[in-house]
Image (spheres, rainbow, N blue to C red):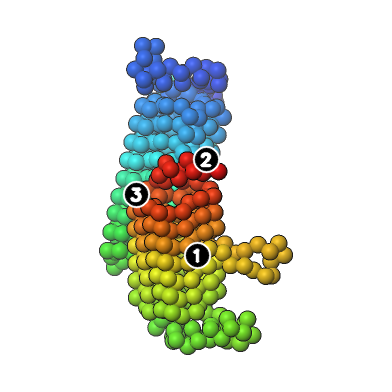
Amino acid sequence: MTLQDELEHKDQWTKVSQQELDGMLDRHEGFVESRRDGERMQAGMHDLSYLDLSGRNLSRVELTGAVLTHANLQGTILDDAILFAADLRFTNMTESSLNRADLRGACLAGADLSGATMNDVDMRDGVLLRSAAEGGDMAPLKHDNGSAGMEKTTLKGADMTRAKVSANLIVQTDLTDCILRNASFKGANLSMSNLTGCDLEGADFSNANLSGAIFHGTVFSSTILDNADMTGADLIGAMFENMDFSKVNLSAAHIAKTLADMDIKIKEGILKHGKWVNTNGKEGERADLSKMDLSGESLQSVNLSAADMSFAVLKGANLSKSEFLMTDFSFADMRGAILARADLRGVKMSRANLTGANMVGTTFGEVAIALRADGSAWRASLENAKLRGAMLNGAVMTNMDLVGADFRDADLRDANLAGSMLMDADFTDADLRGANLSKTDQRGAKGLPNKFEDDEDED
């Protein structure tokens, strides 16, 4: 390619001003609404970098090869959009809708897609061929310093159900709390990525590179991992159901240890911890049961207050009538556990999975801390915890942190949640008959009956 050819090649994108773009957006929304003055936006090979497209309905827009670096697409509807080989680096696409969008060959490095809905999106490989110059040979389109892929892309809380992702580099991608049910990541490179809290039910990671990835609180259910590389992956706190690891490289992976692996007697540990609690730490020893598999164990009527049980596997364990004041259960797998009438004041259960747990008559709430200069109490926390189908009848849950908690299908009859923070919590199909939600912060909460929302407005 001659110098002249290179100069012509660099001018292949048509620059658009914000004023010109606004007109195109208005006409496209008319097209979506089937208005007479509507016109489909076809801005393939246009330069829309740094422009504002937020909150618009751009369903079926055509943006093949377009440059949208640093553009604002927050809350934009891009369902069925064609973004083939588009440059979306460092784009703000939070809370956008990209259902069935064509993102093959697109460059998403550094983009923020937090909270985006991306059902059936196609993110596989794709190459756009362009003439290098008039009369010249065809050559792959290349964006300046950019290549197709998702390196360091943020996808927190995105719904990527049935998405198709290629083997392009998506190293160090943040996929925290993503829904990846039945998605295809065959051969994808997710090394060092964060998949904390993801739902991987039915997802296909065959031949994928998952080395060094973090899977805290991740749900693996019928997930396909044939020939996947999980070397050094952190699987502490992950939940497994109907899984086959026979063809997976798990060398140096971090997995919860059983009691036998730790060579510890649970009764002795509890006795030492009891002495540690009763003597304010002067005697005995604090129980450290973190990262241990205690599935089905009986810890009924014991005192493990202030113990470290983070990342523990307590699936089906009996913890009823026990004392767990200020105990750390962060990321613990407590599916189906029995916690009926337990004392959980000041407990930390951030991102714990309590799906189907029995917490009838359990006491949460605050613990007064004399050492705090301001005299404030220590709140119990279920932040981002999963409590789907849990039984919380008559539970005392006052003045606690329930931000982002999942209470779908839970039984909260006669539960007392007065003064608690319910921001972004999901109560869809939960039974709240007789529940007390007075003085609660309900911003962003889902599934609450109108009467509770009205009561808050009156306060």
Q: Name which residue type carries label 2.
A: Asp
The image position of residue 395, as x and y in percent, is 44, 63
373 left or right of 122 in image: right
The image position of residue 202, as x and y in percent, is 29, 54
Q: Secondary structure at mark 2?
A: helix
Of residues 195 and 309, the one drawn nearer to the viewer in this rendering: 309
| Of pointers 3 and 1, the one earlier in the residue sequence | 1
Label disc, if present, on residue 429 of the rendered structure: 3
| Mark 3 surroundings within 10 Å by alpha-carbon count, few (fewer than 14), some (14 through 19), many (20 or more) | some
Of residues 301 and 168, the one drawn nearer to the viewer in this rendering: 301
Q: Which quadrant of the view contains residue 353?
A: bottom left
Please say if 308 is above or below 432.
below
User: Which residue lies at the image location 42% right of the left edge and 27% below the top edge?
Assistant: 57
Q: Is residue 23 visible?
A: yes
Label disc, if present, on residue 364 of the rendered structure: 1
Residue tagged 2: 457
How far separated are the C-alphas under marks 2 and 3?
A: 22 Å
Of residues 305 and 59, the one drawn nearer to the viewer in this rendering: 305
How far separated are the C-alphas under marks 2 and 1?
A: 26 Å
